[in-house]
């Protein structure tokens, strides 16, 4: 338990191939279907982050199945589609009718950026994303939508305006923002960044990850809450693989936290719980059973 808001612990996914392997030892041999895996995961954790929605738009039918297969108080945090956060988005991941509406100069490219789409196409993709989450929202199972911005998303008036534009498309949902450019948290800018998020009801994502690269952020716990929900995402400390090209996500985040590291992090979770009604603690070190193992350890530490 934590003083203040409740802390919910989970992982960034439940179907990573290395977690599904028998060697990982998380899922029993008889748990083989998509339904059974989610039900088993939800019997161990109260929260999960959906990563697949970064790569393709979700759909209402799938969201409805997630609702049916999980306990009443289970929560899903949804990672925003890559197009919405300034990442290059594979054209093939767009819905077919959107692809067919692209001009020739875009449809022939492997990827597309948000600002290159006609405004009506952008609006339609946003609409479909928000609409797909309605079953989760109606059931009280939508935790928040995560906007994870890339390293080249620098602090500026234009960037802040874009965050507000994204927020406007998700008004009925709770929204969190994760930066991957340390200049947002530079000493001379941190207060303004956090104040901007607070003024607009956006949850700041505290990041624990490798240090020393352009996409590294220090683990900063604000002195004030920016939203009713606080978020901590834990990426591990595999510095060698953090920005390596051509490797799987599992290899990038291959890191097992020690108990000493987890105890220190649990203290920071308790700090966040003093500022928010709810804290989402998400392990993204999704290699084999590393995330679920560390998640279980964290749950026990927070219960002490």
Image: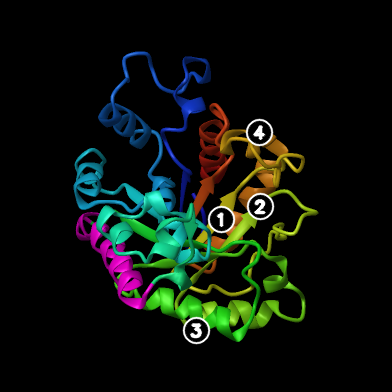
Residue 277 seen in this snapshot: no
Image coordinates for residue 47, horizontal then vertical, percent? 40, 46
- The residue closer to the viewer here, 293 or 188, is 188
| Mark earlier in primary sequence (1, 2) | 2
Circle count: 4
Disc 2 to disc 4, how far (Cα)? 13 Å
- Residue occupied by mark 1: 232
Which colouring convention does the figure follow?
rainbow
Report the residue marked by disc 2.
208
Depth check, front residue: 140 or 278: 140
Does residue 85 appear to the left or right of 102 in the view shown? right
- Residue with the mark numbered 3: 199
Where is residue 124 drawn, in percent x and y?
28, 69
| Quarter assignment of residue 107 | bottom left
Q: What element carries label 3?
A: helix
Left or right of residue 111, residue 62 in this image: left
Determine crowd level at label 4: few under 14, some 14-19, many 20+ residues with C-alpha closer than 10 A: some
Distance from disc 3 to disc 2, alpha carbons, whole Å, reads: 24 Å
In the image, residue 227 above or below residue 216: below
Secondary structure under badge 2? Answer: strand
Q: Is residue 300 left or right of residue 244?
A: left
Q: Name the residue under label 4.
A: 256
x, y (%) of residue 111? 48, 55
Determine the residue positioned at 66% across, 33% down: 256
Earlier in the chain: of badge 1 and badge 3, it is 3
The part of the chain drawn in magenta is: 118-139
Magenta region, main secondary structure? helix
């Amino acid at each position: 338990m934590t003083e203040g808001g409740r802390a919910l612990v989970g992982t960034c996914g439940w179907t990573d191939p290395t977690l599904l392997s028998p060697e990982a030892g998380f899922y029993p041999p008889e748990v083989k279907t998509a339904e059974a895996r989610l039900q088993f995961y939800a019997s161990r954790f109260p929260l999960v982050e959906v990563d697949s929605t970064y790569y393709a738009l979700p759909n209402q039918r799938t969201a409805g199945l997630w609702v049916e297969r999980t306990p009443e108080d289970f929560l899903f945090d949804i990672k925003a589609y890559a197009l919405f956060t300034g990442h290059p988005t594979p054209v093939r991941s767009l819905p077919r009718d959107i692809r067919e509406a692209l001009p020739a100069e875009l449809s022939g490219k492997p990827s597309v950026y948000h600002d290159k789409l006609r405004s009506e196409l952008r609006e339609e993709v946003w609409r479909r994303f928000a609409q797909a989450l309605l079953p989760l929202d109606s059931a009280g199972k939508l935790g928040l939508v995560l906007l994870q911005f890339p390293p080249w998303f620098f602090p500026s008036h234009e960037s802040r305006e874009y965050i507000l534009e994204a927020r406007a498309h998700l008004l009925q949902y709770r929204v969190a923002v994760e930066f991957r450019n340390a200049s947002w948290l530079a000493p001379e800018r941190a207060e303004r960044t956090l104040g901007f998020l607070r003024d607009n009801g956006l949850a700041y994502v505290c990041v624990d990850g490798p240090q020393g690269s352009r996409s590294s952020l220090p683990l900063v716990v604000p002195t004030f809450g920016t939203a009713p929900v606080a978020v901590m995402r834990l990426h591990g400390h595999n510095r060698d693989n953090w920005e390596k090209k051509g490797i799987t996500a599992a290899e990038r985040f291959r890191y097992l936290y020690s108990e000493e590291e987890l105890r220190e992090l649990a203290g920071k979770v308790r700090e966040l719980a003093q500022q928010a009604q709810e804290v989402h603690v998400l392990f993204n070190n999704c290699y084999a059973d590393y995330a679920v193992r560390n998640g279980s350890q964290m749950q026990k530490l927070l219960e002490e």
